[in-house]
Amino acid sequence: MAKITYVQTDGSKQTIDAENDSTVMETAVKNQVAGIDADCGGACACATCHVYVADEWIKITGAPSEMEEDMLDFAYDIRDSSRLSCQLKVSDELDGLVVHIPEQQG
Amino acid sequence: MVAEGVETFDPIVTDAVIVGAGPVGLFAVFELGLLDIKCCVVDILDKPGGQCAELYPEKPIYDIPGMPEITGHDLADQLVKQGAPFEPLMIFGHMVSNLERLENSFKLTTDRGQVINAKVVVIAAGGGSFQPKRPPIPGLEDYEDISVFFAVRRIEDFRDRNILIVGGGDSALDWSIALQPVAKKITLLHRRPDFRGAPDSVKKMRALVDAGKIDLVVGQVTGLNGEDGRLSGASIRSDDGPPEILCDTMLPFFGLTMKLGPVADWGFDLENNRIPVNNETFATSEPGIFAIGDINTYPGKLKLILCGFHEAALMSHGAHHYVYPERTIKFQYSTTSKDLKTKLGVI
Ligand SMILES: Cc1cc2nc3c(=O)[nH]c(=O)nc-3n(C[C@H](O)[C@H](O)[C@H](O)COP(=O)(O)OP(=O)(O)OC[C@H]3O[C@@H](n4cnc5c(N)ncnc54)[C@H](O)[C@@H]3O)c2cc1C
Ligand code: FES
């Protein structure tokens, strides 16, 4: 299990207990975190689950796969911290993870 | 790319109009066809298959009865083939924006002005209509349809324009290549040097860049500059590019997203953005209007393709008397009924 904090653009925060082997996207959708549309339900096929991983966590979450990097082309305002949250698998290692939700998914 | 078809503005008259060419709308063509109900199918996408075609064409689906494994693309293909004997009229690249009840029929109008008259309306709008993503660039709305466009309808409209195309997928590549001969100038802006589009298009684009016919800049748009909707340039963030790209037109291509769209304005009492139906005939609260597939809700609803197929069959029986009030339906099997086999063209 891992506690994940979702931060909205207005600074408001939600911290949620996420199950191992779920994804950062699924946890958000299940708990009605606003701003994660996830049109494709986690197939890495829509880029509407874009988040920015907090700087201190980038090392731990690692780099996106090639498929995810390609899909990120369909999100807006890509930064070094950009990830598709359906590709972030929850594990004990991610306990305390902070992700920022973009202003809009598109 | 959306095909540059000839616009037929003559009104279409049909028995049933199906809003949405996803798997469920496509199967409804078949089920309605068996009951002699002629269909016209409309979808904003440029191809049939809905989510299967747009979101996961290459992924295998494992829970279609009788098909242990089939990709989204192949399922869409097979469904089109299955409905083909009934010669449905398929209209792509149109969004049904208006639904109006006339005395004994319905009048639907698309965003491009096509009018369709039908006795029955089948809403198979799935998760909503696929629409271009509108990147949250400040002030973007002020420029929309004047100098910012999310689709190209007619190449000629872009003659002699100084165009900035944004994105790295197939649409960005295809339109850079297709508009290059008519445009005054094309700048292609993408966030990274790599392109995910079809290798052949990437090659063509790079050749045009080498020949000095397309400017390629690596970076991202941060703001728009201009007045009264007329663009003079786009501010960009880039490591080695300029701070601003001068242009009078911008085409952002960030893919599509599902938005409920016009269905929300058709007077249904939506539950969680779904249309409530009775699960005997999948009729909505409006007589003559049915809703099947992901767009509907009823106790026990499962958003699965196979459930949508079942709904299409029962809906067709419910819709029959709106088209043929004087007839009763004779229940028949496709295996044994001569009548059905004749309709299917197999005997
Ligand atoms: C990645 C992924 C995997 C999936 N895997 C499975 C699986 O294994 N098994 C399964 O059963 N299901 C699966 N699904 C769900 C399945 O794809 C949907 O249940 C199915 O597509 C619903 O079909 P539909 O015809 O109701 O709607 P859709 O496929 O959503 O099609 C609706 C169509 O209507 C169009 N439309 C809507 N409004 C308008 C309008 N006003 N004017 C014009 N056009 C309009 C849209 O553009 C769209 O093309 C999966 C979904 C995803 C995203
Ligand atoms: S949910 Fe579609 S890419 Fe993540």
Image (spheres, coloured by chain):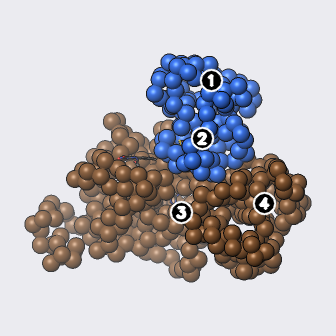
Q: Is residue A94 left or right of residue B236?
A: left
Give the CA distance from mark 2 to mark 1. 16 Å
Give me the residue at 59% from left, 61% from top: B197
Q: Give the crowd class for mark 4: few <14, some 14-19, many >=20 residues within 10 Å.
A: many
- Chain A: what color? blue
Amino acid at dot 2: Pro
Residue furthest to the left in view is B336
Vertical placement of residue A19 versus A73, above or below: above
Give the CA distance from mark 3 to mark 2. 32 Å
CB atoms at circles 1 and 4 under 8 Å apart?
no
Q: Give the crowd class for mark 3: few <14, some 14-19, many >=20 residues within 10 Å.
A: many
Determine if marks 4 and 3 fall on one subunit: yes
Determine if marks 2 and 1 fall on one subunit: yes
Give the CA distance from mark 4 to mark 2. 23 Å
Give the CA distance from mark 4 to mark 3. 31 Å
Tag of residue A97 = 1
Q: Give the crowd class for mark 1: few <14, some 14-19, many >=20 residues within 10 Å.
A: many
Residue that mark 2 sits on: A64
Q: Residue A36: tell me if it is visible.
A: no
Q: Is mark 3 within 8 Å of ligand 1?
A: yes
Give me the residue at 27% from left, 70% from top: B36
All told, the count of numbered labels is 4
Residue that mark 3 sits on: B44
Give the label, 3 or 2, closer to the camera: 2
Q: Is mark 1 within 8 Å of ligand 2?
A: no
Disc 2: which chain?
A: A
Vertical placement of residue B313 versus A76, above or below: below
Query: Which comes sooner in the sequence, label 2 or label 1?
Result: 2
Amino acid at dot 4: Val
User: Is A97 in front, or is A10?
Assistant: A97
Q: Is residue B81 left or right of residue B334?
A: right
* Label 3 SS: loop
